[in-house]
Image (spheres, rainbow, N blue to C red):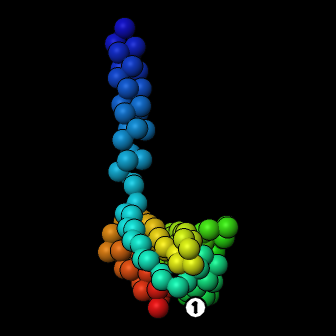
Amino acid sequence: MNITKFASTGLLGLSLSAVSLPALAAPEIATGDRWLEGVNQNQCLQRADNFIAELGISSDGGEIDRTGYFDDGTFRILCYGASGDSMVIVFAAHEDDLDVATGFANFALESIGD
């Protein structure tokens, strides 16, 4: 009977750690946006492509987004068009440093916005 209690307690402990450990390993995420007047969606995406090429990193792209990796982090750049203008939104995540994620997001917005 003591072995059953011990096994039950052990399984409960493993179950709780399986649920709580992933939450402890959550990445630090930063985001930002910028309105680009006179820059349509395709031009916004081209600017994102140029920014990524200047960094010399690989990325994947869709119809409205670009996704890639930097150091210990990831990013996604979205471009939404509206009447000849566009909105660029940047999400950046880093394994453990919010300042790195925030710095990357701000750098991307400045580079794409200029």
Determine crowd level at label 1: few under 14, some 14-19, many 20+ residues with C-alpha closer than 10 A.
few
In terms of depth relative to the viewer, which is nearer, 36 or 109? 36
In terms of depth relative to the viewer, which is nearer, 60 or 13? 60
The structure residue drawn at horizontal position 49% and vertical position 73%, both measured from the top left corner, is 87
In terms of depth relative to the viewer, which is nearer, 24 or 6? 24
Query: Picture coordinates of residue 14 (x, y %)?
Result: 41, 33
The structure residue drawn at horizontal position 38% and vertical position 26%, both measured from the top left corner, is 12
Q: Is residue 30 above or below residue 40?
A: above
Number of marks: 1
| Residue 34, picture quadrant | bottom left
The residue positioned farthest toward the top in the image shown: 1
- Mark 1 lies on residue: 54
The residue positioned farthest toward the front in the image shown: 83
Q: Is residue 34 above or below residue 113?
A: above
The amino acid on which the numbered mark 1 sits, given as a three-letter code, is Glu
Query: Picture coordinates of residue 75 (x, y %)?
Result: 51, 70
In terms of depth relative to the viewer, which is nearer, 58 or 42? 42
Q: Secondary structure at mark 1?
A: helix
Left or right: 32, with 57 as reference point: left
Which quadrant is the N terminus positioned in? top left
